[in-house]
Image (cartoon, helix red, strand yellow):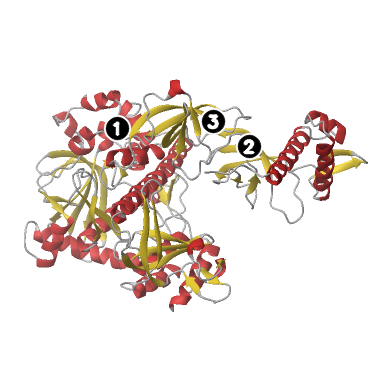
Amino acid sequence: MAKGKSRGQKRVQQIIEIEENVKGILNNNAGKSFNYKQIAKLLNINDEEKRRELLKILDKLASQGIVKETRRGRYMVREGKGYVTGTVELTRMGYGFVVTEELDDDIFVTGRNLHTALHGDRVKVWLYARRKGARPEGEVVSIIERARSTFVGTIEIVSNLAFLIPDSKNMPFDLFIPGSKLNGAKQGQKAVARIVEWDNRAKNPVGEIVEVLGYPGDHETEIHAILSEFELPYSFSPEVEKDAEKISDIITGEDLKGRRDFRDVPTFTIDPADARDFDDAISLRKLSNGNWEIGVHIADVTYYVKPNSLLEKEAKQRATSVYLVDRVVPMLPERLSNHICSLNPGEDKLTYSAVFEMNDNAEIVSEWFGRTVINSDRRFSYSEAQKIIDSGEGDMSEQLSVLNRLAQLLRERRFAAGSFFFERVEIQFDLDEKGKPLAIRFREMGTANQLIEEFMLLANKRVAEFVGKTLKGKTFVYRIHDKPDPEKFDSFVHFIKRFGYSLDNSNIRSLPKAMNRLLTQVEGTNEQNLIETLAIRAMAKAVYSTDNIGHYGLSFRYYTHFTSPIRRYPDMMVHRLLTAYLNKENPGGKEKYEKLCEHSSKMERVAMEAERASIKYKQVEFMADKIGKVFEGVISGVTEWGIYVEIIENQCEGMIHIRDLDDDYYEYDESNYCIRGRYSGREYRLGDRVKVEVVKADLEKKQLDYRFA
């Protein structure tokens, strides 16, 4: 139970409030000067003790250079640097920082001066005069755009007062929910609330419950809570479903006009065993000149999803399918994603294809892009295709063997040209009928995966080259990846030295080859996952853009996303743009597509965060019955508040709090990625192998607590 504040604490709080109010008055009246009596009157300060405090505060602000004394006893704000815009990063303590491209440093904003701005909001900030050596400080003057409108949390009802306690670490305010706005929510339930009112003088925003999710711990409740937390939908509106139902699944002669017919060419798909939509297929036949014709066939989604339709608007808004541990939240309704557009075996399907004539050395002799029709002969899972490639026996073994050989040649050339060799481990869960995790597995990547990867990369690359290089100057959607940040990479190079590895990052052009040598060296070692994770973090993030700067990680001058229009909206944009150029049409201005690129990049990041949250939740749930058990792990993170340890056998990451290390006083050494005992000198470093005991599995916070065994 929280204790009441002491008299001393109350006095400190009072002084802080007076100081913030003084700054507010002077900043809101820039150019005017006031004596302390005028300021006291504006602040309703009447008693002598508070007036003395006010004088001390004014002297302090003057000595700090925040205000200036125009003449004895009169004060005005020093000229600040005007207004800047940026994005709020809120802390659990209630204060925040505004990140802006206009300044090198983030702007500190006290809780009082946030004026109801929340995490992620885009705001306009007035910069206070900056005293020498201090970080910039300011005050939010307007909220340009709210980052979110709803919040997920748990209902708390005490003495007829109801609150929603938000799950998010970045939301320090509980939402007050009037009884009339509970909408059936009960004590302890998870729910979604919307802020309906927030007076700047009120401590808590007022909200209303818009959806009751259920009780914590229930699988469906928690998955829906994750989707709601990231403001992602988990169903389609009846209107959108109705729009999808109107689309005919019968292919007519009209549909086939202008299409190349590949229905008699051996064709197959390779996908994960649990996949339900198949948006890419490969065909192969030998030509009379001895070369190979390889068709990369992609679901022709834009033939069915028309511009300005409800389906189009929905796909544009979602921008991507979301892959959680137990389900896919599709970008398009199931009628399209799993039925009409999905390249199911034995069915005629309308496709958009990149067709290559290749010689035995995997060199492209000619290429063609356009609309086609196919009929897939076989649907392989990756494991089925892998067995046939390894044994040389089974369905379509000849086609798989040829394509595998060509793919390996493409792969060798790609790495020789400087493509990065990253193969991240994918986590899979075995779930029971109630969604409880029974086991954690790692998805294996074999040559069957590489076969599909290489031909999809080839199609993406050549489509981008065709528009960007051959047509030149045309608006297009590229997948771009910038060079790594030198400072981040220097830190990474410094870190790997403790494991005995070195990396020459002095030449940005030769860096990929040096990195690939490192990744080959660490393969199979205990530190492999850690080093690969940190290497990826040191890299820039790939995004969509109409301004092509190339793809550094793949070492491609031109690259796009063409191969997954069922699950990615940028691929739909690429199909539309390519169609326009093939038909000699004008698709519209660049500005429209750049905005769509920014939105798609943002939604891609949101989807990835939701996926990670669902994995983290299931990992915590998986470890919940393993309290007291000991596991071997690797220190995967070091912070001033503790050590993160990732268990080797299942990659479940938990924290050892620094406050629980009672054998010494430990201090954080950021530059050396460690914490160090002040008296013993004992160090715990990033990458150290340790044994840990599971102490706590907090499902609500999605957190695991460990201690050294």
Relative to 32, does residue 484 appear above or below in the rendering? below
Residue 315 versus residue 87: which sits nearer the camera? 87
Relative to 440, does residue 229 appear above or below in the rendering? above
Residue placed furthest toward the left: 394
Q: Position of residue 31 (x, y in %)?
A: 82, 35
Q: Amino acid at mark 2?
A: Lys
In this figure, which residue is indicated by the disc labeled 3?
205
Q: Amino acid at mark 1?
A: Ser
State the SS at label 1: loop
How many marks can you see? 3
10 Å crowding of disc 2: few (<14), some (14-19), many (20+): many
Residue at the (44%, 64%) spot, across then down: 534
Q: Position of residue 590 (x, y in %)?
A: 46, 38
10 Å crowding of disc 1: few (<14), some (14-19), many (20+): few
The answer to whether mark 3 and mark 2 are in CB contact below 8 A is no
On the picture, is 88 further left or further right than 357? right
Tell me which numbered mark, 3 or 2, is placed earlier along the sequence: 2
Tell me which numbered mark, 1 or 2, is placed earlier along the sequence: 2
Residue placed furthest toward the bottom: 500
Eye-nearest disc, 1 or 2: 1
In this figure, which residue is indicated by the disc labeled 1?
235
10 Å crowding of disc 3: few (<14), some (14-19), many (20+): some
Q: Amino acid at mark 3?
A: Pro
In this figure, which residue is indicated by the disc labeled 2?
124
The answer to whether mark 1 and mark 2 are in CB contact below 8 A is no
State the SS at label 3: loop
Q: Is residue 566 visible?
A: no
Tell me which numbered mark, 1 or 3, is placed earlier along the sequence: 3
